[in-house]
Image (tube, rainbow, N blue to C red):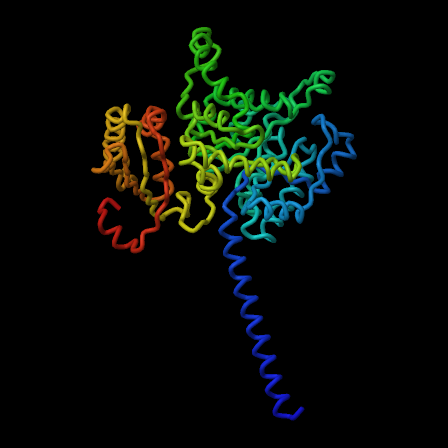
């Protein structure tokens, strides 16, 4: 073989290798795009079990305190399951039971912060607090939020008998209110517990639902969420028994007030602060029941990883996606439940800015609403009233403009523009908005709330002189 032929062969091989590399890069790019497109789920309910946490519990003989063995946890296994299930981001919280020392809680919070930092975009975390010591909890909350950049706070339903709603926790809620905190709630072992009964019916089977309902009822009875309206609470496990308990609580409240057992209760303000994850026995029927006490924008996907086997969670998520696509009354809320609601709640960055973006940025949305024909006249009256009240009484509401489609009168679009995050948060807590929200819930057949990014913010500011 001549030198010239060698050079030609080498050149041909070089070009072949180069083309192969280009092809490999092309397919890698396509795979990346497909991966990013598929990761459209955010999991608001997952748990972190650190070695320090497990070692501390073992030393105190508390590994079985919740009535069942604690699962194994490893970050690489969690990520592997997230990738397989199509979950972009998981929110980590400390599992039950509550550690007995502030040191272990601090170590766990720092581990969660490190995981978030090392796996950008894959994890958020809500910090645990060393209750029942309220002063220590205040210090840890400030450290976690300011230094560790926690995305919220995790609270147990009770710690050593100190239930949420207890008067001594008001100073903690005042701090969380000033910080506009998201609180992820999780049931813990009640005090006392009937041991023989618990052996037959583990806490997770029934008492966790009672425990969650008990804590929320206690908070509502003292108007905690109405008094600290900037605190948003995520209720786990499909709302526990609240869809059944809330109507009963409302019916009993007048009797309790007549006997001086409770004071006035602002039901609308308390319930407006509650969000609900769908970890556990979700189904179309369960979601419809939850919608009797809340609205679709307050429902969030949750897995409860690693307390349920990964293959079971994957099948459960697939089933949820299926019925959220198939059921006509739930299909409009599919993307909201799977990721958009929690992105809004947690202030996560997304393709478009979330309504809880940094203060000072305008919030722009177009609410796309379809109303049941039989409720159209009543809905329009509600919409016109909330428009008038908002524009007249809220300087931060730049525009709230309902419009009716000429082709189909049941299709309503509302252009919403708020001066900033604070203006929006103030708006959704006003009495006129809550009246509109609760009063029209049964009238709405479809609702979507896409956020928009103004292409020219300065021109927009000039258009709306109120800014």
For the image, the number of numbered tags is 0
Q: Nearer the viewer, residue 1 or 358?
A: 1
Residue 373 image position (x, y, % from top left): 28, 27
The answer to whether residue 178 shows anywhere in this view is: no
Q: Residue at x 58, y 39 (%)?
A: 127
Q: Residue at x 47, y 13 (%)?
A: 248
Residue 204 image position (x, y, % from top left): 64, 26
Residue 467 image position (x, y, % from top left): 26, 46
Q: Residue at x 31, y 33 (%)?
A: 370
Q: Residue at x 50, y 17 (%)?
A: 245
Farthest residue in the left direction?
406
Placement of 298 over or under 465, stated as above or below: above
Placement of 93 over or under 281, stated as above or below: below
The answer to whether residue 85 shows anywhere in this view is: yes
Say whether residue 109 is left or right of residue 338. right
Say whether residue 125 is left or right of residue 96. left
């Amino acid at each position: 073989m001549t030198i010239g032929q060698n050079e030609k062969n080498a050149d041909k091989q070089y070009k072949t290798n180069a083309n192969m590399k280009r092809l490999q890069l092309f397919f890698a790019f396509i795979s990346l795009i497909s991966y990013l497109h598929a990761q459209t789920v955010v999991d608001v309910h997952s748990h972190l079990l650190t070695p320090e946490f497990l070692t501390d519990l073992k030393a105190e003989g508390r590994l079985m305190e919740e009535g069942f063995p604690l699962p194994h946890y490893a970050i690489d296994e969690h990520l592997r399951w997230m990738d397989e299930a199509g979950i972009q981001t998981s929110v980590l919280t400390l599992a039950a039971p509550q550690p007995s020392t502030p040191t272990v809680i601090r170590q766990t919070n720092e581990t969660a912060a490190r995981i978030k930092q090392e796996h950008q975009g894959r994890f958020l975390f809500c910090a645990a607090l060393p209750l029942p010591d309220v002063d220590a909890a205040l210090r840890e909350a400030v450290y976690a939020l300011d230094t560790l950049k926690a995305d919220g706070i995790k609270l147990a339903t009770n710690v050593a008998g100190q239930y949420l709603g207890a008067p001594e926790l008001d100073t903690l809620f005042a701090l969380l209110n000033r910080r506009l905190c998201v609180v992820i709630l999780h049931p813990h072992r009640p005090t006392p517990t009937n041991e023989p009964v618990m052996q037959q019916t583990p806490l997770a089977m029934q008492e966790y639902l009672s425990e969650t309902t008990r804590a929320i009822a206690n908070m509502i009875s003292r108007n905690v969420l109405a008094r600290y309206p900037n605190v948003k609470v995520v209720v786990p496990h499909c709302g526990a028994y609240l869809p059944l308990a809330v109507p009963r609580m409302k019916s009993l409240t007048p009797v309790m007030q007549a006997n001086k057992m409770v004071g006035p209760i602002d039901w609308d303000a308390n319930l407006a602060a509650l969000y609900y994850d769908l970890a556990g026995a979700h189904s179309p029927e369960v979601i419809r029941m939850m919608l009797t006490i809340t609205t679709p924008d307050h429902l969030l996907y949750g897995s409860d990883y690693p307390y349920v086997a990964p293959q079971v969670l994957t099948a459960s998520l697939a089933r949820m996606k299926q019925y959220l696509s198939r059921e006509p009354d739930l299909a409009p809320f599919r993307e909201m439940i799977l990721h958009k609601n929690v992105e809004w709640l947690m202030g996560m960055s997304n393709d478009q800015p979330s309504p809880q973006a940094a203060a000072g940025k305008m919030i722009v949305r177009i609410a796309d609403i379809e109303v049941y024909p039989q409720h159209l006249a009543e809905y329009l009256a509600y919409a016109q009233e909330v428009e008038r009240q908002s524009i007249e009484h809220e300087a931060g509401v730049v525009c709230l403009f309902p419009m009716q489609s000429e082709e189909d009168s049941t299709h309503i679009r509302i252009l919403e523009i708020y001066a900033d995050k604070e203006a929006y948060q103030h708006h959704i807590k006003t009495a006129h908005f809550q009246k509109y929200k609760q009063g029209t819930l049964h009238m709405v057949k479809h609702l979507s709330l896409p956020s928009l990014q103004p292409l020219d913010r300065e021109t927009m500011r000039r258009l709306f002189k109120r800014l």
